[in-house]
Amino acid sequence: MVAPQRIRNPRSARTATQTRIVKNTRARYGAIVRIAGGLSIALVALMGYLALLSNVTSLSYALDKAQHQRDVLQEQTARLDDAIAQASSEERLAAIAAKLNMHDAQTFAVVRIEPPATVAKSKIPLFDTIAAWF
């Protein structure tokens, strides 16, 4: 039998042992870590897709609501235009004027309005600025 030889440098043996333990541990759990990482990436991608899809759906509902509101406003505008046309028709206004005994004016009065007088400016611009604040 061969006699065991003494290890010259115990630190290198300890380092080799530690390296072997770390390598075996990484080999044991490496596949699990890769699978978990792949599933995590797939989950993040799926959640991003669902977020985008929900955003598109909400925008679709908002667009439909805005189109419906536009249609309602167009109908209301058409009804109001008809009511304005009916209220401002010449025949209707003539009938109301006849009922109130109104007639066309015989003379016209012209009124002239003088422009407002300008305020004299002071020679010191600081006082104008202070007066403008009040």
Image: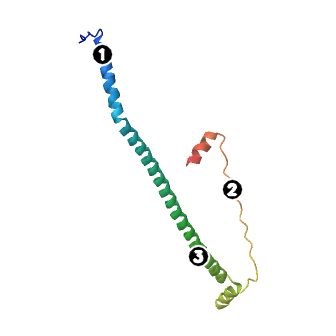
In the image as oriented, which residue stretches furthest toward the front? 1
Depth check, mark 1 against mark 2: the one in front is 1
In the image as oriented, which residue stretches furthest toward the right? 107
Name the amino acid, label 2. Ala
Number of other residues with Cα within 10 Å of mark 1, as a class: few under 14, some 14 to 19, many 20 or more: few
Q: Secondary structure at mark 2?
A: loop
Name the amino acid, label 3. Gln
Q: What residue is shown with label 3?
A: 76
Q: Secondary structure at mark 1?
A: helix
Q: Secondary structure at mark 3?
A: helix
Number of other residues with Cα within 10 Å of mark 2, as a class: few under 14, some 14 to 19, many 20 or more: few
3 or 2: tag closer to the N-terminus:
3
Tell me the quadrant of the picture where the N terminus can be found.
top left
Mark pair 3, 2: CA separation: 49 Å
Q: What residue is shown with label 2?
A: 117
**What residue is at 66 percent from the left and 51 percent from the top?**
119
